């Protein structure tokens, strides 16, 4: 895996067995931390109040049978065998499934889509569109907007529940691990020790987030490996020592016998049993950091057998012990021998910290993805590692998660309520994944709809059973993830709705290219030195914020670039395909359009590298455009006249320019350091040079051309002048022009719309990060233009 270049790219060749083994070992600390600590609280949550552990052992045998078949059907068969194959260029998770569906069907609600986006290398389709027939499901989704909105809402629900899981999983994991102290403390001291210690560990865990996990990440895999070995060894000891015949409880007959005896209370206890699947979604969400074969190998050969042995060992011990003064003692630590209880306690706490770290990092990642798709307010994203992709830290979310985790721990104070809340969040995410995967089977894999329906019916029925058992615990803790989801859904829907409406307002109020070209002829209009970067969401036309800017201040920069930073429904965009460059008007106007494309997992550049790459790509575009115009002039002389008559069509011609293309023959001397770059267009004959030599920087572009041709010589002079103007503007400085918006509803709007836009959106806009922070614009170079959006 190449993690040096900002992403983990796997080679198209199949990984060697050594690489697969190494990746499988590394995946233990990242992927399986949460899943491996589930034995700490599954039995304890199941036997909390709904059912009792009786002398007949029918309850414990039935629970073990449920746990075994749940782990076999959901994580092993559904995720490892099917869902992991629905990857998006190696990436997994809710947004990966939605991205796949959006590329194979026109269901995306994101604005500023372009046909050029479909030419990206990562914008691959399972089958060419001309070779596939449209299914009825695809036609219905594309025809009815309400279905597309419902699909996006479902994705948002899954996202909200993942964020809710980021609150609940650290709380229940650390609390369950620390609760092992109950066996070493008196009953009066337990409450005063377990809760404070849990809160201290949680606070310490969140306080370390800004350092990033790459500094201690090498310890994660050994900790989880030691924990898996420990609990499987304890489980094997309990099986041999207490009940070697426990394997008979794996018979599905015991599930029916369990439900027949316990009836409604047994059904309600399924809310605790489903916690054995906690962390299964991480196998799919973290697929991009590893390979399919590595995750499959680690789970089938190590994690799955260790979990089964741990659960069987606990059941074997409990089948011979029934004298518990409280049902809360039916847990993991009661089955651990006294001599090794303290080492196991320490190892369990370390493993719970690793598992919590995985879900916290996943929460940061999914919020960053939601933000890239305009479904979440802007937050500050800090990349904690320059070498390892995906290591991000969001300060606001981190401290909010810490406060909520500690509040859940202090408020609930027991595994039962935490388990009910966590279970509902986990099973909801699984239901969303099942539904989206069934759409992928039809729309992307082009399998028969009957096969997708069978997948949805089989796994959806199992998960719906667990979902109903969790939902019935609404008053006993399950209300918390629902409340968190409702709040987050309101925030995401308000932000997404208003963002789309703002884009439509900009689209309807943009000014024409003729207006821009006529500015130079107006009396008093001045072109000042420097580069002006006008940020807009539009991919064509002149935005209204720029017209407002020049109306109040009759001047704009010598080189004008309309920059559109947009997200496309792919996980990554290769640097060579990131920039689309075109002209706005004739060459003499020195106005350009630059569309910068990012995937939903891409790392946005800092301003310095973006500014440097932008100048390089503009220079390359100028040379390519001159070469293209020369070839056209020699072939069709009438083309130039046609372009002059229809100058507005020029800006529609956008060229993909590789970032950092000038790497071999143009030289940049930045404060004494020299590097060499090269243009994409070369010729024969003598070269001309455009050079500016300021006191601190020296920038040169070499132009190779054939001066024997009069047209070519004239073209080279024009290119030299344009490059000289670009370099001079670069040395004069760059200004970033952004719109500072205020949004209000039209008179006569409904009360709901006024609450959403006038109150909700404006509150979020005032209290969240501005676009200058998201785009990493330096405050000294920022120019904000006030805009009022009447929606």
Image: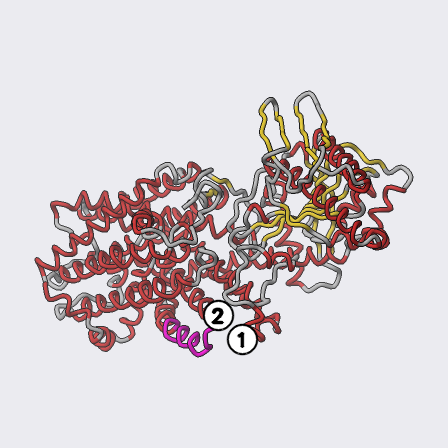
Are the residues flagged by discs 1 and 2 in contact, CB closer than 8 Å?
A: yes
Q: In which quarter of the image is residue 326?
A: bottom left
Q: Classify the position of the C terminus by image quarter.
A: bottom right
Q: Which of marks 1 and 2 is nearer the N terminus?
A: 1
Front residue of 745/704: it is 704
Q: Which of 130 and 711 is in front in this view?
A: 711
Main secondary structure type of the part rendered in magenta: helix
Say above or below: 370 vs 149. above
Residue 564 in picture, x, y percent from top left: 66, 48
Q: Is residue 33 visible?
A: no
Magenta span has 264?
A: no
Residue visible at 70% across and 29% down in the picture: 731
Tell which of 531 and 577 is nearer to you.
577
Q: Is residue 441 part of the magenta span, yes or no?
A: yes
Q: Nearer the viewer, residue 655 or 56?
A: 655
User: Is any part of residue 492 visible from this angle?
Assistant: yes
Q: Mark 1 points at which residue?
A: 137
């Amino acid at each position: 895996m190449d993690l040096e270049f900002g992403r983990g790219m796997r080679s198209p060749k199949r990984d060697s067995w050594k690489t697969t083994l190494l990746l499988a070992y590394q995946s233990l600390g990242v992927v399986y931390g949460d899943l491996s600590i589930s034995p700490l609280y599954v039995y304890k949550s199941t036997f909390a109040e709904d059912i009792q552990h009786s002398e007949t052992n029918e309850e414990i045998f039935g629970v073990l049978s449920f746990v075994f078949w749940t782990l076999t059907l959901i994580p092993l068969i559904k995720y490892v065998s099917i869902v992991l194959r629905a990857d998006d260029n190696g990436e997994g998770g809710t947004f990966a499934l939605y991205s796949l569906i959006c590329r194979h069907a026109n269901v995306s609600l994101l604005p500023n889509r372009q046909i050029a986006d479909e030419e990206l290398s990562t914008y691959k389709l399972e089958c060419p569109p001309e070779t596939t027939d449209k299914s009825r499901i695809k036609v219905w989704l594309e025809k009815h907007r309400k279905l597309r909105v419902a699909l996006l809402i479902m994705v948002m629900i899954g996202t909200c529940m993942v964020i809710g899981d980021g609150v609940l999983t650290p709380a229940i994991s650390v609390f369950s691990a620390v609760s092992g102290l109950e066996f070493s403390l008196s009953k009066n001291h337990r409450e005063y020790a377990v809760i404070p210690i849990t809160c201290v560990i949680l606070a310490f865990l969140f306080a370390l987030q800004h350092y990033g996990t790459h500094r201690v990440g090498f310890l994660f895999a050994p900790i989880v490996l030691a924990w898996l070995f420990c609990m499987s060894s304890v489980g094997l000891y309990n099986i041999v020592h207490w009940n070697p015949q426990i394997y008979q409880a794996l018979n599905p007959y015991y599930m029916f016998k369990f439900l027949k005896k316990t009836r409604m209370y047994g059904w309600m206890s399924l809310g605790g049993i489903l916690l054995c699947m906690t962390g299964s979604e991480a196998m799919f969400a973290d697929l991009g950091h590893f390979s399919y074969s590595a995750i499959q190998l680690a789970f089938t050969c190590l994690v799955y057998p260790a979990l089964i042995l741990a659960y069987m060992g606990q059941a074997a011990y409990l089948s011979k012990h029934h004298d518990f003064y409280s049902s809360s003692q039916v847990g993991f630590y009661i089955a651990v021998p006294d001599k090794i209880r303290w080492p196991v306690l320490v190892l369990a706490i370390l493993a719970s910290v690793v598992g919590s770290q995985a879900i916290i990092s996943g929460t940061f990642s999914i919020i960053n993805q939601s933000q890239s798709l305009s479904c979440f307010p802007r937050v500050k994203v800090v990349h904690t590692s320059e070498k390892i992709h995906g290591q991000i830290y969001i300060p606001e979310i981190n401290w909010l998660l810490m406060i909520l985790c500690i509040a859940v721990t202090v408020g609930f104070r027991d595994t039962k309520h935490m388990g009910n809340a966590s279970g509902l969040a986990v099973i909801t995410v699984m239901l969303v994944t099942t539904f989206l995967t069934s759409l992928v089977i039809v729309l992307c894999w082009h399998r028969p709809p009957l096969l997708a329906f069978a997948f949805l019916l089989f796994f959806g029925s199992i998960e719906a059973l667990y979902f109903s058992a969790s939902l019935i615990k609404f008053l006993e803790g399950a209300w918390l993830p629902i409340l968190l989801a409702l709040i987050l859904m309101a925030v995401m829907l308000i932000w997404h709705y208003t963002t789309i409406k703002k884009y439509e307002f900009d689209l309807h109020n943009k000014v024409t290219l003729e207006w821009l070209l006529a500015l130079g002829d107006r009396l008093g209009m001045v072109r000042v030195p420097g580069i002006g970067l006008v940020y807009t969401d539009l991919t064509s036309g002149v935005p209204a914020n720029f017209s407002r800017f020049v109306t109040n201040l009759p001047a704009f920069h010598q080189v004008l670039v309309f920059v559109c930073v947009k997200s496309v429904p792919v996980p990554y965009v290769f640097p060579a395909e990131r920039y689309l460059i075109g002209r706005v008007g004739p060459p003499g106007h020195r106005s350009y359009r630059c569309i910068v494309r990012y995937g939903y997992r891409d790392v946005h550049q800092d301003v310095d590298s973006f500014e440097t790459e932008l100048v390089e790509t503009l220079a390359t575009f100028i040379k390519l455009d001159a070469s293209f115009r020369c070839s056209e002039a020699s072939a069709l002389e009438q083309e130039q006249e046609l372009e002059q008559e229809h100058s507005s069509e020029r800006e529609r011609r956008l060229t993909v320019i590789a970032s950092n293309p000038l790497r071999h023959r143009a030289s940049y001397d930045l404060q004494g350091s020299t590097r060499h770059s090269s243009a994409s267009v070369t010729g024969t004959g003598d070269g001309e040079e455009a050079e500016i030599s300021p006191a601190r920087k020296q920038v040169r572009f070499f132009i190779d051309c054939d001066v024997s041709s009069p047209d070519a010589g004239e073209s080279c002079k024009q290119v030299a002048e344009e490059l000289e103007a670009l370099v001079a503007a670069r040395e004069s400085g760059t200004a970033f022009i952004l719109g500072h918006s205020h949004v209000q509803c039209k008179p006569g709007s409904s009360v709901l719309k006024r609450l959403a836009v006038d109150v909700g959106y404006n509150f979020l806009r005032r209290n969240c990060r501005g676009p200058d922070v998201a785009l990493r614009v330096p405050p000294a170079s920022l120019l904000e233009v006030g805009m009022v959006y009447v929606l």
